[in-house]
Amino acid sequence: MNQNADAIIVGGGIAGAATAYYLAKAGLKPILCEKGEIAGEQSSRNWGFVRQQGRDPFEVPLMIECNRMWQGLSAELGTDLHWRQGGNLAMAADGKRLAALEGWLDVAKLYQLDSRILTNKQIRELIPGIEGHWVGGLYTPSDGQAEPAVVAPAFAQVARQLGAEIMTGCAVDEIVTAGGAVTGVRTERGELKAPIVICAAGAWSSRLLRRLGLSLPQLLIRGTVARTTPAPKITAAGVWGPEVAFRQRSDGSFNIAAGTGTDYDIVPDTLRHARAFWPNFRENRALFDLHFGPAFLKSLWSELRLSETGRHPFRAIRVMDPPANPDRVANALAGLKTVFPNLGPVSIVRSWAGNIDATPDAIPVLGGVEAVRGLLIATGLSGHGFGMGPIVGRLMAELAAKGKTSFDITGFRFSRFEEGATLGARSVV
């Protein structure tokens, strides 16, 4: 095969950009295709938490290594990623929630993490000026934060310097196969050939893989975030409480979100994957506000070949930009002022939303696909992929270059859904 690259990456979020970087660093030639811009969707819209705390046990070994990687990434990439190791705190309003957080300490002890339970008094000592009636919280001092908007572009920039080709504004229409193996991708600019294709397409992965006859259970959850005006610097910890979740940025402004609840827009995929998601939804029904309306009709139309969107869905929507929920913005700001009654005047500078690509068990899909040789998948990071992005990229590069990974990723295999081997959502944060 006359190939254009050693590997083609579909998707320019943090997972895809990090994969391109580690492949190029290993001396391979990758091509990254992104239909819009680098970090245009989920990877620039998240909270910016980098946490080991509260994760599914399968994820913890990866995140311990990734936490170590984060500490040197700014120097490695030559860009200030605003990394600060201020810890992560999850606060509990009642005994049931505290018991769940306490239960996760068994995982922390297994991996010798520095996680511990704090009392209300200890929370107040940790974060000056905070007020509330929490019964306690889970705190991991070694966790940290970084600035989402700069990380994936930094990976992509250095990958390009090392020889990777970064093609933005280039939609991949389909992954091309022959004889049960990938041969490349067909893009709006023509066909590209490579023996390995890595699907890191985030919220678009299920639809892209469906064109190969592969069923990836993946649904999109709409999360709303807002940013405040700068305030006096209080903490470098990422905090998630019942009233508000927040991260104070290096300039003093806060990124905030409602402490509980999120929005889910019912679409045709809801019906397509209902069976896979039902157990988790039933257990966590109170966390979701369901919406049926324009999003369903828009999604349905986009699946019909009668429309241009249906024929070329990845070209039609360059950047998925869902609307922020103004009620959640207002509630988050009110929550921030409740927990910091002496904060002084702060207001909202901007608000935005992003679609979180979630799997039924809330952990990613990482690895190959038995039915299609040369196809690797890195998607479904389920709302906590920003912190994992560097290790995901490194592992995908290892798998592409060597056929094996330095960490066990069996628990993230694509086939687990078909095998009925999912264990339910086991994260507590």
Image (cartoon, rainbow, N blue to C red):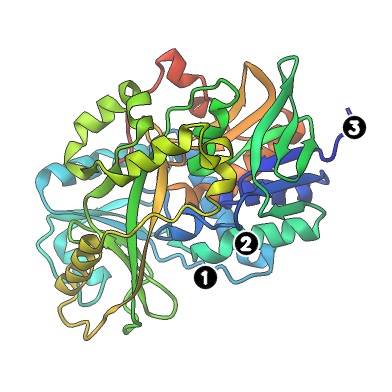
Q: Nearer the viewer, mark 2 or mark 3?
A: 3
Q: Earlier in the sequence, mark 2 or mark 3?
A: 3
Instruction: List the residue tagged with mark 1.
Output: 82
- The answer to whether marks 3 and 1 mark residues whose Cβ atoms lie closer than 8 Å is no
Instruction: List the residue tagged with mark 3.
Output: 2
Q: Nearer the viewer, mark 3 or mark 1?
A: 3
Query: Which amino acid does the dot numbered 1 rest on?
Result: His
Percent of width and height locating residue 424: 32, 27
Query: Which amino acid does the dot numbered 3 rest on?
Result: Asn
When asked about the image quadrant of residue 357, the answer is top left
| 243 to 189, vertically: above or below | below
Percent of width and height locating residue 285: 19, 36
Q: Earlier in the sequence, mark 3 or mark 1?
A: 3
In this view of the protein, which residue sits in the foreground, 267 or 197?
267
Percent of width and height locating residue 378: 57, 37
Q: Residue at x 40, y 46 (%)?
A: 356
| 145 to 263, vertically: above or below | below
Viewed as shown, does residue 196 lie left or right of 51? right
Question: Distance of mark 3 from mark 1, alpha carbons?
Answer: 42 Å
Viewed as shown, does residue 140 lie left or right of 76? left
Q: Residues within 10 Å of mark 3 (few under 14, many from 20)?
A: few
Instruction: List the residue tagged with mark 2.
Output: 153
Q: Nearer the viewer, mark 1 or mark 2?
A: 2
| 337 to 420, vertically: above or below | below
Question: Distance of mark 1 from mark 2, alpha carbons?
Answer: 14 Å
Query: Which amino acid does the dot numbered 2 rest on?
Result: Pro
Q: Residue at x 45, y 13 (%)?
A: 419
Q: Residue at x 56, y 20 (%)?
A: 213
- Camera sees residue 418: yes
Mark 1: secondary structure: loop
